[in-house]
Each structure stands twice: as C-alpha cells, then as structure tokens.
Amino acid sequence: MYFFLLNLTFLDLGNISTTVPKSMANSLWNTRAISYSECAAQVFLLVFLLGGEFSLLTVMAYDRYIAICKPLYYGTLMGSRACVKMAAAAFGSCFLNALLHTANTFSIPLCQGNTVQQFFCEIPHILKLSCSHSYLSEVGLIAVSGCFFFVCFIFIVLSYMQIFTAVFRIPSVQGHHKAFSMCLPHLAVVSLFVSTAFFAYMKPLSLSSPAVDLVLAVLYSVMPPAVNPLIYSMRNKELKDALRKLVQWLQWKHQ
C-alpha cells in the first residue's frame, strides 16, 4: 500500500506543478501568454498524470480487495515484483495514451484564433479553436480513453462490492473498524477524483460558461492532488492527535 501511496504522491505533485506555477506567474506578470511548446507539454503531462492517477487508484482498489478478501494470498499476489509490474503497466499505458492525445491534438489546424478560455491548456478548449470536422479523430480517441476509464471505474465498484460483502461477514467490531480504516481513505480519494472530473466533462451544455468551466477545472485538476495527502494522512495517529488538540485549543480560545 505504501509503495502505491508513494507513486500517488508523485503524481499529485506533478499535477499541481503542471498548471499552478504557470498560472501564478501569469497572474504576477499580468499576462495570459503561453508558448506553443509549453501548451503541448501541459497537455501531455496533464493527460499522463491524471490518467496515471486513476489507473493507480484502480490498482490500489485491487490491492485492498486482496488484503481483505484474500489475506492469505496477499504476500504472493501483491509481492514487490508484482506491485512494480502493475505500476509500470499503469504508467506505460497512460504514457502512450498521453502521447497519442498530444500528437493528435496539436496536428489539428486551428481556424478560430489561439485564445484558450482556461487557465491551462485543456484539450476540449483547444478543440473549440479547430476547423470544423478536423477534430473527429481526437474525439474518437477521447471516446476510446473514456471507455478505458469507465472499465476501470466498474472494476473499482465491483472490488468494493466484494470488499464490503467480506467486511460485513466479520463478526467483531474491531475487525470492521480495521477494514474500513484501510478502505475509506482510498474510497474518499476515488470519489473526489471521479465526481469532480465527471462534473467537469459531463455537465449539460446549458451550464457551460467561462466562469463555470474555470471553477470545474480547478476542482478536478487542483483540488484532488491538494486534498489527497490530507485524506491519507488522517490514518496517522500522531496527526489525528495533533488535529484533535488544535480543535480543543480553538474551542478553549473562543470560550
């Protein structure tokens, strides 16, 4: 689990570093300019890092399933070599997916200027600037990627159905608490990631506006990487004790 958490931390750090520093620099210099190569790099890194994060969360769901439903086989199925292979497969497939998306997106001619209505280069907003019917290949590629992530989502749901079925068979309350403490942080991270991305890309056209698109982009590209470390840190006893003392001190101060 900690091997996957380490990889997830690097992905979260990469997500934040891809968009926020450039946006902050533009705000300080009162400009909205970004070079062609920087825009292409942003698209590649975002597709790779966001895809890698969801793929890694899928692998982590399998890890939780084996730990709770088949604990006697955990050492065999989730050994160090198996974990490295699963992480490498997730990152390799997402690297190829990001490469295809970036090459396909930036091969499309732009007929409606070069102003992207977003604080970072995002594929849907770039496609809005393309010539009519020239972006159909990219739309098809997005559909294929969407199907892949939908399969990952179904796998996560089925894994947790098996996990909760096994947990409710545990007779002791302590066993319930231990199992849920293992699963709830991961489930919270998955829910945050999926819900923000779903609202960003599947919202009705009637709700689409520059302001709404900006808020939703911040929600799915900045909030999950920023909140994920806090969610997983809540399993740390020392951190929970420090947070409890802080809350008690604030309550005492206001009295």
Image (spheres, grey):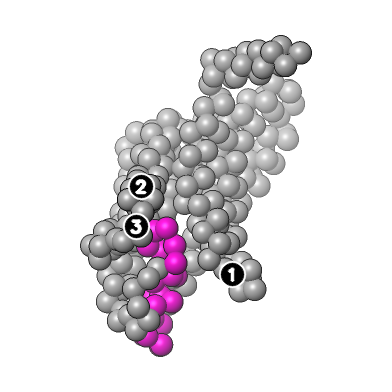
Gap in angstroms between the C-alphas marked 1 and 2: 28 Å
Q: Earlier in the sequence, mark 1 or mark 3?
A: 3
- Left or right of residue 27, residue 220 in this image: right
> Up-down: is 54 above or below 34?
above
Q: Is residue 138 magenta?
A: yes
Q: Position of residue 113 (x, y in %)?
A: 35, 78
Residue 28, numbered label: 2
Please name the amino acid that badge 2 sits on: Leu
**Are the residues flagged by discs 1 and 2 in contact, CB closer than 8 Å?**
no
Residue that appears at 76% across and 13% down: 255
Where is 240 relative to 66, above or below?
above
Residue 120's place in the image compared with 66, above or below, is below
Residue located 64% across and 32% down the image: 180
Direction from residue 73 to residue 83 in the image, left or right: left
Which residue extends farthest bottom?
133
Quadrant of res 70: top right
Check disc 1 and report the residue beneath it.
208
Which mark identifies residue 31?
Answer: 3
Identity, as a three-letter code, of the amino acid under mark 1: Ser
Q: How many marks?
A: 3
As drawn, the residue found furthest toward the left would be 37
